[in-house]
Amino acid sequence: MRIFDPHVHMTSRTTDDYEAMAAAGVRAVVEPSFWLGQPRTSPGSFADYFDALIGWEPFRAGQFGIRHFATIALNPKEANDPRCREVLELVPRYLDKDAVVAVGEIGYDSMTPQEDEAFAVQLGLAVEYDLPALVHTPHRDKVRGTQRSLDVVRESGIEPGRVAIDHLNEVTVELVRDTGCWLGFSIYPDTKMSPPRMVELLRRYGCERMLVNSAADWGRSDPLLTLRTGEAMLAAGFTEDDVDRVLWRNPVEFYGASGRLDLADAAEVDAAGDASGPTGEFAGNSIKRGGA
Ligand SMILES: [Zn+2]
């Protein structure tokens, strides 16, 4: 099984996670810029973070044979902090970079006027830079947040097929299904979506435009839940081709719209093959002497 995790915050994960992901068949990831938990107090902190997302983190991933791409944005939560507003002027500089395959995560946290503005401005940047957009839907008041997100997407004029509405569930899937946007689902260990619930949604709605991610970060999460979802699909009677579509070809198609998704070696791996461990290559190399 080859896996592309279209939403995972590797900055918050350990080297052991990379190793386990590589062994599980994860060959490519997209790391959206997001809220780090500790509030940032100046745009400079964001610049360093964005640099890490296109520099250090791809290097870390590369030690395990994993391709790493990023999405860049001022996240909804910190859009509310006036000290972070200047980040909106910083974002365009990063949207020119080869490793950046979308604008994101944008969207709503608490649905404030400040979030409205940051969301609309950054959808405009996605149009201007001809990039897809990754839209985070709020964990509270999800239905209203999803509806309002779809309104803002519509008003922006961005082509719906270049937008992924993420963190959907059984309730919000219906709102997005007929909009032409991609449908993102984050599989979590105990709350929200689980592999069996995801399989049920795939059975009901099919595999088209469906994106499955672990959204693993600094909270309770598990970067192997993409694999677990693939396993649950097979156990439920989906074919290996279905699994490959959901866990590989769909994210490739969505982020491929950026024109920057270079998967030259990663894509050669045969769909049914198991993880050919890159372990020999990285054993004893520079990741171990990093020591940061
Ligand atoms: Zn996220």
Image (cartoon, rainbow, N blue to C red):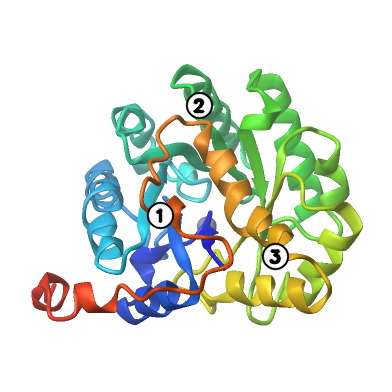
Q: What kind of residue is marked 1?
A: Ala
- Residue found 80% across the figure and 46% down from its top: 144
Badge 2 local density, few (<14 within 10 Å), some, or many (20+)? many
Expressed as whole percent of the image width and height from the top left, the position of residue 102 reads 47, 37
User: Residue at left 80%, top 42%?
Assistant: 176
- Marks 1/3 in contact by CB < 8 Å: the verdict is no
First in sequence: mark 2 vs mark 3: 2
Pointer 3: residues within 10 angstroms few (<14), some, or many (20+)?
some
The CA span between labels 1 and 2 is 26 Å
Q: Is residue 242 visible?
A: yes
Q: Residue at x 51, y 51 (%)?
A: 77
Name which of mark 1 and mark 2 comes first in the sequence.
2
Identify the mark at residue 126; answer none if there is no mark: 2
Residue 188, position as x, y percentages in the image: 64, 74
Amino acid at the residue labelled 2: Ala
Residue 215 as seen in the image, left or right of residue 10:
right
Q: Position of residue 46 (x, y in %)?
A: 29, 47
Task: Return the x and y of residue 197 as percentages of the image width and height.
Answer: 81, 72
Circle number at residue 240: 3
Q: Secondary structure at mark 3?
A: helix
Residue 34 appears in the figure: no
Q: Where on the picture, by quarter, is residue 67?
A: bottom left
Amino acid type at image mark 3: Glu
* Ligand 1 within 8 angstroms of badge 2 C-beta: no
In the depicted view, which residue is nearer to us: 57 or 28?
28
Pair 2/3: label in front: 3
Residue 266 is tagged as 1
Residue 71 sits in quarter? top left
| Farthest right residue in view | 204
Q: Nearer the viewer, residue 226 or 70?
A: 226
